[in-house]
Image (spheres, rainbow, N blue to C red):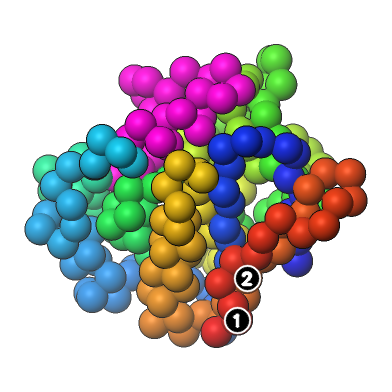
């Protein structure tokens, strides 16, 4: 599996493909839910991480503030306040790892997307629904994962159409790393890989290719 990436001076993506032996169901095991509780992660995001991730999102003209800030900022704050509840096993694994490293990631159901997958900036007028209340996010200027039908995930909010549910077995977990935090995206991906492996999942790294058919950019952690 590979993802084609438009040129971006700050983006350092890492991703893993996850496959569970059975549908993930609705309830995470107690050990995973515990990782979402206060005291099991940083109480606040480091200024270095906050600045680096916001710079990544700002590059295309997007304004990462208010409700449009990186998901990692919300996770750290919510967890410290005891407001980060369990959602679904794969989502919980991603949230626990993202909270620990301070970098955003996306969790996408691979059976809900239409290949090929690419990463590029959102275009004027592009937006998508991100929750069951049909609320929308304007993604103009925001670096996004997209499929044949348009943008579907980013470092702020993933689209409702690609989110996992209790029937999910195959998923893509994409880390929105930045070159300003060397090695951090790989560490986060390895942390996620370890957590989903404990859920019984098989994993493999995802290759990234530059647009235009150039050589591979990088790939995620090895198979497990």
- The structure residue drawn at horizontal position 59% and vertical position 78%, both measured from the top left corner, is 222
The mark nearer the N terminus, 1 or 2, is: 2
- Position above or below: 126 against 51: above
Camera-side residue of 199 and 73: 73
Q: Quadrant of residue 35?
A: bottom left
Residue 39 in the image, given as x and y percentages of width and height: 10, 58
The segment highlighted magenta reads: 50-75
Q: Is residue 68 magenta?
A: yes
- Position above or below: 110 against 69: below
User: On the rendered structure, is 210 left or right of 152?
Assistant: right
User: On the rendered structure, is 61 left or right of 28?
Assistant: right
Residue 212 in the image, given as x and y percentages of width and height: 89, 44
Disc 1 crowd rating (10 Å Cα; few below 14, some 14-19, many 20+) is few
- Number of on-image labels: 2
Q: Is residue 213 magenta?
A: no
- The structure residue drawn at horizontal position 83% and vertical position 44%, both measured from the top left corner, is 211
Residue position marked by numbered label 2 in the rendering: 205
Quadrant in which the C terminus is drawn: bottom right
Q: Give the CA distance from mark 1 to mark 2.
A: 6 Å
Residue 191 in the image, given as x and y percentages of width and height: 39, 69
Residue 49 in the image, given as x and y percentages of width and height: 33, 41
User: Disc 1, disc 2: CB below 8 Å?
Assistant: yes
- Position above or below: 126 against 209: above
Camera-side residue of 40 and 14: 14
Residue position marked by numbered label 1 in the rendering: 223
User: On the rendered structure, is 14 left or right of 194?
Assistant: right
- The structure residue drawn at horizontal position 70% and vertical position 15%, both measured from the top left corner, is 124
- The structure residue drawn at horizontal position 71% and vertical position 21%, both measured from the top left corner, is 123
């Amino acid at each position: 599996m590979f993802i084609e990436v438009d040129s971006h001076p700050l983006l350092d993506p890492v991703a893993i493909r996850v496959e569970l032996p059975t549908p993930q169901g609705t309830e995470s095991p107690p050990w995973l839910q515990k990782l979402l509780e206060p005291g099991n992660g940083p109480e606040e995001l480091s200024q270095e991480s906050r600045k680096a991730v916001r710079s990544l999102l700002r590059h295309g003209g997007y304004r990462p503030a208010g409700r449009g800030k990186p998901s990692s900022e919300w996770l750290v704050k919510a967890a410290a306040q005891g407001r980060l509840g369990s959602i679904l096993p794969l989502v919980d694994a991603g949230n626990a790892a993202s909270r620990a490293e301070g970098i955003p990631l996306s969790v996408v159901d691979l059976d809900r997307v239409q290949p090929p997958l690419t990463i590029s900036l959102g275009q004027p007028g592009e937006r998508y629904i991100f929750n069951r209340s049909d609320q929308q996010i304007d993604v103009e200027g925001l670096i996004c994962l997209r499929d044949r039908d348009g943008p579907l995930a980013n470092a702020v909010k993933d689209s409702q159409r690609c989110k996992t549910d209790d029937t999910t077995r195959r998923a893509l977990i994409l880390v929105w790393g930045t070159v300003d935090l060397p090695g951090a995206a790989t560490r986060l991906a390895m942390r996620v890989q370890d957590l989903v492996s404990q859920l019984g999942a098989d994993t493999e790294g995802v290759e990234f290719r530059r647009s235009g058919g150039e050589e591979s950019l990088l790939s995620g952690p090895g198979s497990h």
